């Protein structure tokens, strides 16, 4: 028996006491390691080992045994571990843990015999029942409000709508409250197995997003002046993560032009319930305009009418059509000419109720230049919900990229305009300047030549 | 004193110390009575506690910054620091299931405390409402006898005896001012004449 098995045994024994069917029950009270137990454990571990000449009838049992040993949760055999590692599913946790899992009775988490835990569960269950009763009452109230005639209310139709709205909000809140103290819900959410169609998981995901990721996005919006350069005001409410070629990109990162040649894929997570349509716009906010000595905007990608709900998350911009959306302006790889400062590539995700006509969008924004986010927002009656961004600068690959995509202007280099000084020219002064002439030829070694 | 002498006398006889040193070893000081058991180890010459003794090298200024060297005191301090309110316990390190159980118990405890707090608040609110309604009732009643309306309320609101027998609230003990007094307390005050 290995060391980890020996160490784990006292814990296991205490767990097994209820269901144990050991040959010697006196061994339960001894805390020291006895050889006898080792033998028992070993025989039980290798009980299903097949006899050396396997008869054809017991062949399936043999397979089963091998398979059981190859479970990453319970195996402690060296060969099985090696095999699992090779197969890409390494054994889970420590060997001690695996032994514990294999040899202990499989008690569900809720029934673990810890007194404080069980008492706590009782309190939480009572609370949950209370919340469920409230949910029933709130649902009845919502039904009642929905059936009332708006003429009998003082505020009329608007008042009824407001009451329905607030009753719904209260109901959602209660649904979250009913489940928020459940350890299994917490576990499932932490494992990433939460069902986003349920309000509790949406609530937890929203809270986690707001803890750090949203703060970073808001910081980027402020520090890169997305507000007010592109939109007058903007509060992100949906999580948008950016992936280029399967690699996650931190918001605001400067990307190589060869990497951004292919459209990125987004991971869009909305936190409010219901179906809606999404639009995605990628805007370059820093296209240099030499005539006006300013910067323009350019649309690099525009897609609309992507049906979306909280259970969906992955949105590759190369497969928007497959997701049910319409691509109005296809992907143009971001590029920045030599000498221009970094370009901010802003990715906006909009939300709208009604479908927009992609042909109309093509007509409006097909030229790409001078794309205004506000104009798009007003034209489609949509509201911006998500944001992410990256930056692009001139690099080694940009010239080849522009040639590949027939983008003119790769040879242009932007330079600062030089202005002649308004002050009159002044001769050079100082010790060095004084000793430049032939008179100080003997000091040549020590005097720097001024140009 | 007697016991000290009784043990020191044979010692002195043993070592045969000269009379001049003997007078230093056994000073006729009153502090000798405070040590009932004779200590053979060298007793400190000064009887003041060690921390308050002046350090001749450093002077008296940075006394608090000197490192404590006595291991006994160090260990005592360490154990007492556990009791101090500024002591921050180390973080709990738990495995998954254990942490989930801990979290469950924690949530239940918070819920329980919240229930208690809300019940107490409700009870206090109920009592306050009861008092308020009683006062309102008093304010609207007439009498007794020929008394006008609100008499009972006025009488009930009197604060007679609230500040002690024939007392006044402490706020009235001196003139209320915007700023503190220039002289906060007159220490040299003497009663001018006996009552």
Image: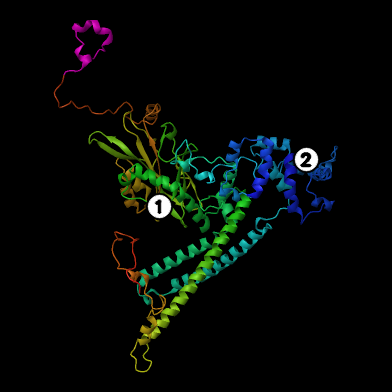
Which residue, as the protein is rendered here, is positioned at the far top?
A442
In the image, taking residue A286 as reference, residue A172 lies left or right, namely right
Give the residue drawn at x 30%, y 67%: B176
Looking at the image, is A441 positioned above or below residue A113? Answer: above
**Label 1 CA crowd tier, 10 Å (few <14, some 14–19, many 20+):** many
Element at label 1 = strand
In the image, taking residue A289 as reference, residue A353 lies left or right, namely right
Which residue, as the protein is rendered here, is positioned at the far front?
B19
Q: Find disc 2 in the rendering and name its residue.
A: A1
Give the residue drawn at x 37%, y 88%: B141
Give the residue drawn at x 42%, y 81%: B133
Residue A350 place in picture, x, y as percent: 39, 50
Q: Find out whether residue A430 is within the magenta segment.
A: yes
The chain containing the residue under callout 1 comes to A
Residue A173 place in picture, x, y as percent: 48, 62
Q: How is the image coloured?
A: rainbow
Q: Quadrant of the N terminus of chain A?
A: top right
Q: Find out whether residue A54 is within the magenta segment.
A: no
- Magenta stretch in the rendered image: A427-451
Give the residue drawn at x 55%, y 70%: A133
User: Which is more toward the observer, A433 or B24?
Assistant: B24
In the image, taking residue B68 as reference, residue A86 lies left or right, namely right
């Amino acid at each position: 028996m290995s060391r980890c098995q020996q160490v784990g045994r006292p814990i296991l024994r205490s767990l097994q006491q209820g269901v144990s069917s050991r040959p010697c029950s006196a061994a339960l009270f001894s805390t020291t390691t006895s050889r006898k137990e080792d033998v028992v454990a070993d025989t039980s571990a290798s009980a299903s080992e097949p006899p050396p000449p396997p008869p054809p009838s017991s062949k399936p049992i043999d397979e089963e045994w091998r398979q059981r040993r190859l479970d990453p949760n319970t195996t402690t055999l060296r060969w099985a571990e090696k095999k699992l590692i090779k197969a890409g599913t390494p054994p889970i946790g420590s060997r001690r843990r695996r032994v514990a899992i294999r040899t202990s009775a499989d008690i569900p988490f809720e029934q673990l015999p810890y007194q404080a835990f069980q008492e706590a569960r009782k309190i939480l269950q009572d609370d949950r029942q209370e919340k469920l009763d409230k949910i029933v009452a709130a649902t009845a109230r919502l039904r009642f409000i929905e059936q009332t005639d708006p003429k009998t209310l003082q505020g009329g139709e608007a008042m009824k709508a407001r009451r329905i709205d607030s009753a719904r909000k209260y109901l959602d809140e209660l649904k979250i409250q009913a489940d928020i103290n459940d350890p299994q819900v917490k576990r499932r959410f932490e494992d990433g197995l939460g069902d986003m169609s349920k309000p509790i998981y949406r609530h937890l995901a929203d809270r986690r997003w707001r803890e750090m990721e949203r703060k970073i996005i808001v910081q980027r919006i402020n520090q890169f002046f997305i507000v007010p350069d592109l939109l007058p005001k903007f509060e992100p409410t949906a999580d948008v993560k950016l992936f280029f070629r399967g690699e996650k990109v931190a918001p605001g990162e400067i990307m190589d032009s060869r990497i951004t040649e292919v459209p990125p894929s987004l991971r869009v997570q909305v936190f409010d319930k219901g179906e809606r349509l999404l639009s995605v716009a990628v805007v370059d906010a820093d296209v240099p305009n030499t005539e006006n000595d300013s910067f323009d905007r350019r649309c690099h990608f525009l897609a609309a009418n992507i049906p979306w709900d909280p259970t969906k998350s992955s949105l590759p911009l190369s497969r928007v059509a497959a997701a049910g959306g319409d691509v109005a302006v296809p992907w143009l790889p971001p590029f920045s000419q030599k000498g221009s400062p970094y370009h901010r590539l802003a990715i906006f995700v909009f939300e709208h109720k009604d479908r927009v006509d992609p042909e109309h969008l093509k007509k409006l924004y097909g030229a790409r230049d001078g794309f205004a986010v506000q104009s798009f927002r007003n034209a489609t009656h949509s509201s911006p919900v998500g944001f992410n961004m990256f930056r692009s600068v001139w690099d080694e690959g940009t010239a080849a990229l522009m040639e590949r995509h027939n983008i003119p202007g790769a040879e242009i280099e932007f330079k600062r305009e030089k202005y002649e000084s308004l002050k009159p020219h002044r001769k050079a002064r100082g010790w060095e300047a004084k000793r430049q002439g032939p008179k100080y030829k003997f000091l040549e070694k020590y005097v720097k030549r001024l140009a | 004193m007697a016991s000290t002498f009784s043990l020191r006398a044979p010692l002195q006889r043993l070592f045969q110390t000269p009379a001049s040193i003997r007078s230093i070893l056994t000073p006729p000081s009153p502090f000798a009575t405070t040590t009932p058991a004779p200590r053979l180890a060298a007793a400190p010459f000064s009887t003041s506690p060690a921390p308050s003794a002046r350090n001749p090298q450093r002077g008296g200024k940075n006394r608090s910054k000197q490192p404590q060297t006595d291991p006994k005191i160090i260990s005592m301090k360490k154990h007492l620091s556990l009791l101090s309110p500024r002591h921050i316990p180390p973080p709990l390190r738990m495995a998954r299931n254990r942490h989930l159980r801990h979290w469950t118990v924690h949530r239940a405890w918070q819920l329980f405390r919240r229930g208690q707090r809300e019940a107490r608040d409700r009870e206090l609110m109920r009592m306050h409402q009861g008092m308020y309604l009683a006062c309102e009732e008093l304010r609207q009643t007439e009498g007794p006898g020929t008394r006008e309306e609100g008499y009972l309320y006025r009488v009930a609101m009197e604060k007679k005896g609230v500040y002690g027998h024939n007392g006044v609230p402490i706020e009235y003990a001196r003139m209320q001012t915007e700023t503190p007094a220039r002289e906060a307390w007159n220490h040299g005050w003497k009663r001018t004449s006996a009552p």
